Amino acid sequence: MIKVKSALLVSLVICSIVLSALIIFGQHVPKGSDKAAKPWFGPKPGLHEISLPGRIYIYSSEGKAVLVETFSQMYSHLVLALGQMEYSSEKSGDVWVAGQYTADTLNSGVLFRFDYQISRGLLAKWLTLFYETDFPFAAIDSILVPLDGGPVKFINSRSGMLWQLQADLPLVVFQQAADESRNPTAFPLAALESTEVYTVAPGVFDLASTQSVPVPSCRLEEVSAEEIIRSFFISHSIIQEADGVKTYTDGFGALRIYASGMMEYSSGIRGNGPVFLDQLQLMQASIDFLSAHGGWPVKMLPIIFGSQLEDTVRLEFASFADGLPIAGENAGIAVEFQQGQVSSYQRHLVLESEMASEALEEARPLAQHLASDTQVGQYFAEGNKRIADLAPVFYWQQNRLIPAWRVVTEDEVIYVAAGDGRILHISAQLGGQ
């Protein structure tokens, strides 16, 4: 009995020492299991992970280009190499040189392209050897690294301005990528030229010829309704809607989960007066919110950042398959903020399937569709539009993916079937994009 009591006493002393150490060093004291604890949907990404470009082109001075597969090994090498950029050790005079962005300013190099205007604050999370205040611009959408070692160009294609910086970086990584991109299996691209019907901004690339594109098999994200509900509400009531969908609400926020897996959440706004968050703060708030209510997919990047109304900011995110973003009228993730708070959230993710099966689909250059009697050709013939950006995507339609073009004009985003030129969807261009 004495031995048992002694052992018990020793155990209590050890536990006391451990708990005291945890408190002294500011660590949380372990608690018992809490059945009401919020669900965990996986780790959060860092801002440096979501501030990466949606596309990388390897461009030649002859107007030809190759698109690097996003999230591929080459893509990773290139973004890591650019992340090592720093001020040149031989700098003298004005470090930054501003100029006009024209087609003539593009020379052979690696072009990093964002699908939105990235602020200098968010850019500094990727280019970690720079402070936000080092950049002389508010936002850009492209970065060109010349292969000849010339100044790196930071481009805002919307304003037509660029800023050049002579920088130190591992140039050999970019040169090796350019050599590898000459692989004949890569789809050849060419600069899209202006016509009498439409004009084109510099740095916009189209397929050089008709191609057979491998389309991967995909699946819809499986949502655990119970965990999603528990992530939003401690207690709730259920409203049966006329369309058969159940709405879960606590009187302040409302959540709808559809049979397809799509979910929609809307919430009232607490507090009074306007609250303004910059792009960096909004991106971090989006990461925190998505990580708490469904999780962050491995391959996802922001594609839209802009204002719908005076007091509403909308962010959209797309998952990727075979290096291309997956679009669709209800595909992806959208988060809206009012007064610095999430007021709306829609989630309907199409994810790359683990199955290796792929189907071949025909993809024609957009220029062919615009020059013929296709639906998009007729639409562009109605007025002189300016094509500000063009990106290949996969479009989710009738439970499968098809190759498509995302055409960005000055006031619209148009999704076009790459095979036959059908217009799949048109949305207004958001302010601040």
Image (cartoon, helix red, strand yellow):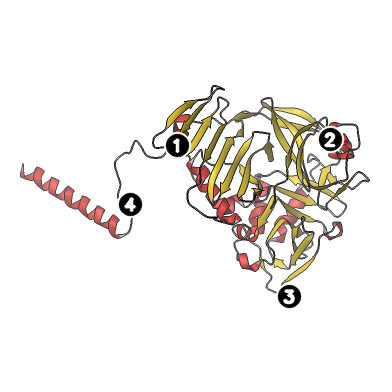
Q: Which residue is mark 4?
A: 28
Of the residues under marks 4 and 1, which one precedes in the sequence? 4
**Tag 2 near tag 1, CB within 8 Å:** no
As drawn, is 121 to the left or to the right of 295?
right
Q: Which residue is mark 1?
A: 251
Q: Which residue is mark 3?
A: 94
Numbered disc 2: secondary structure: helix
Numbered disc 1: secondary structure: loop
Name the residue rendered at 59%, 45% in the picture: 336
Residue 13 screen position, x and y as percent: 17, 52
Q: Identity of the amino acid at label 3? A: Asp
Can you name the residue that lies furthest to the bottom here? 93
Q: Which one is in front in this view, the residue at disc 2 or the one at disc 1?
A: 1
Q: Which residue is mark 2?
A: 376
**Tag 2 near tag 3, CB within 8 Å:** no
Q: Which one is in front in this view, the residue at disc 4 or the one at disc 1?
A: 1
As drawn, is 340 to the left or to the right of 182?
left
Of the residues under marks 3 and 4, which one precedes in the sequence? 4
Q: Nearer the viewer, residue 14 or 184?
A: 14
Residue 313 screen position, x and y as percent: 61, 49
Q: Is residue 54 visible?
A: yes
Of the residues under marks 2 and 1, which one precedes in the sequence? 1
Residue 344 screen position, x and y as percent: 56, 41
Q: Quadrant of residue 174?
A: bottom right
Q: Is residue 45 visible?
A: no
Q: Identity of the amino acid at label 4? A: His
